[in-house]
Amino acid sequence: VLTEVITCPECSEELELDDVERKSRKVYCPDCDVMLDYNFSPMKILGKGNYVELLTTMNLSDIALIKSILENAEVDYYLYQENFNLVRPLVEGAKFMINESEIDKASELLKDYKLNIWGTSVNK
Ligand SMILES: [Zn+2]
């Protein structure tokens, strides 16, 4: 649910959202000098050079496909596999962590795949 006003988790400042911010689901807190990303729950606090989760998948063929897309586009990312093991592969899924400065690019690149494969888009 989109809200008109969010509270910065760092300084408790109330931040009013404009249309662009509501659409991107990111808002800048001038008090903390950080971007707040409320695509995530709890909200993520982004600094320059931070990596943010673009999506999570448990499907190995999706992972290979997404990796090739990101690598072809030279997106700065890494793959985080929590509790990965061969007995129960990808129980927790693999998270694609994207450099915040390239998240829009990566999101655009994977837009169709996110819709087709996961049904819901992370950064709609
Ligand atoms: Zn703040």
Image: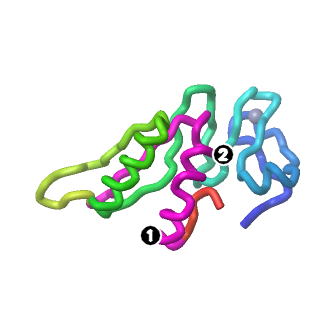
Q: Is residue 92 magenta?
A: yes
Q: Which residue is mark 2?
A: 37
Tell me the number on the disc at residue 117: 1
Q: Which quadrant is home to the C terminus?
A: bottom right
Q: In the image, residue 58 lies at what x, y percent?
A: 32, 62
Which residue lies at the image location 77% right of the left edge and 47% below the top edge?
Answer: 7
Which residue lies at the image location 82% right of the left edge and 39% below the top edge?
Answer: 13
Colour style of the rendered protein structure: rainbow
For marks 1 and 2, give the one nearer the viewer.
Answer: 1
State which region is magenta.
Answer: 91-119
Residue 48: quarter of image: top right
- Label 1 is placed on what type of residue? Ile
Q: Which quadrant is home to the N terminus?
A: bottom right
Tell me the number on the disc at residue 38: none
Give the image quadrant in which the ligand numbered 1 is located: top right
Which secondary structure is most common in the magenta stretch? Answer: helix
Q: Is residue 56 shown above or below 35?
A: below
23 vs 46, left or right, is right
Q: Residues within 10 Å of mark 2 (few under 14, many from 20)?
A: some
Looking at the picture, tell me which residue is in the foreground, 82 or 102: 102
36 vs 91, left or right, is right
Which residue is most to the left? 87
Looking at the picture, tell me which residue is in the foreground, 6 or 49: 49
Residue 37: quarter of image: top right
